[in-house]
Amino acid sequence: MSRRATAFAPASVGNIGVGFDLLGHAIDGPRDVAIVRRIDTPDVRIDAIRGDAAGAATLPLDAASNTAGRALLSLREALDLPFGFAIELEKGIPLGSGLGGSAASCVAALVAANALLDAPLPRAALYDFALDGESASSGSRHGDNVAPMLLGGVALATATRALSLPAPDWLFAVVVHPDQVLETRRSRAALSAPYPLHDLVAQTAHLAQFLLGLQRGDAGLIRDGLHDVLVEPRRAPLIPGFARVKQAALDHAALGASISGGGPSVFAWFASKPDAEAAAPAMRQAFVDAGFDARAYVTPVNAPRAEVIAT
């Protein structure tokens, strides 16, 4: 039995516009890495946090306050393990970026720790522990980031399970991360006021079309469904340049575009890789024109899940 494992977790697009706290997809781009050692003492500790990703230096070393530490504490307690874990994190995903930076640390740590168990758990069984870990950062148990990281591709996240959703391989995304920080708690606070019933009905109709479009591989249904009338209107004012970036995506044949997770990153879906590659520079430039440097990632929507990369 190995006593050390290293795993990565990819960044992700949370919500995918119409699926607030329900949908997400993995990104083939930035990632977090966790190095986990099995230790004899029955506790969990964070030994180091490295990386030049924005916010890495501010992360807590206290295990209960850190997403990776809390996830492994939850795993230890649930399985009544007689041993513990020491964690080192290498942050590649900026915090406050809307790319799942807090979720990736806990997922990478869980996947690594699971490889060190005498009887490793099925991947789906890690979901509940990942929700516990995510709550250390966001203050709530929502799985739209951890689910796609654990499963890859597009995932549906409920309160009790993570489910893979079919998506055609021709779907590609552009995800643009500007040099801005938008804290998750502030982003969620913008949604506190009640919503009119007609907006809820409209969003439900969009979600239904979007999911059916994924199942059928129908670009028209995906396009008709990828319209967020609930979250985007309230969060867009928190992201300088958002309207320009979204319009740049739509001008370059995007099926739809919206805010990635809590923002400020913006994503758009395309019906081919060439369409995505053509749109990426224009979307990035739109943020630059608004006064913010930015980085654009072109990724398949069916991006790989978190995996062990060394033992």
Image (cartoon, grey):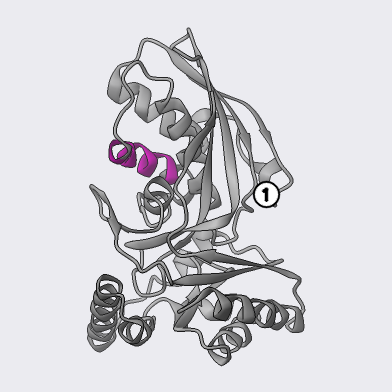
Q: How many marks?
A: 1
Question: Residue 40 or 113: which is nearer the viewer?
Answer: 113
- 10 Å crowding of disc 1: few (<14), some (14-19), many (20+): some
- Which residue is rendered at x = 23% and y = 47% of the image? 160
* Residue 19, image quadrant: bottom left
User: What x and y, as percent, mark residue 145?
Assistant: 43, 54
- Which residue is rendered at x = 31% and y = 75% of the image? 217
User: What x and y, as percent, mark residue 69?
Assistant: 49, 31
- Which residue is rendered at x = 30% and y = 17% of the image? 80
**What quarter of the picture does the N terminus occupy?**
top left
Kind of residue sitting beneath label 1: Gly
User: What x and y, as percent, mark residue 222?
Assistant: 34, 80
Whether residue 268 can be seen here? no
Name above or below for residue 267 compared with residue 64: below
Residue 132 is covered by the magenta coloring: yes
Question: Residue 82 or 120: which is nearer the viewer?
Answer: 120
Whether residue 193 can be seen here? yes
**Badge 1 is on which residue?**
55
Name above or below for residue 143 compared with residue 128: below
Residue 295 is covered by the magenta coloring: no
Please identify the dominant SS of the magenta region.
helix
Residue segment shown in magenta? 124-134
Instruction: Check the image and name the residue furthest to the bottom.
Output: 251
Name above or below for residue 266 compared with residue 166: below
User: What x and y, as percent, mark residue 196?
Assistant: 27, 85
Task: Provide the secondary structure element on which disc 1 rests.
Answer: loop
- Which residue is rendered at x = 68% and y = 83% of the image? 282
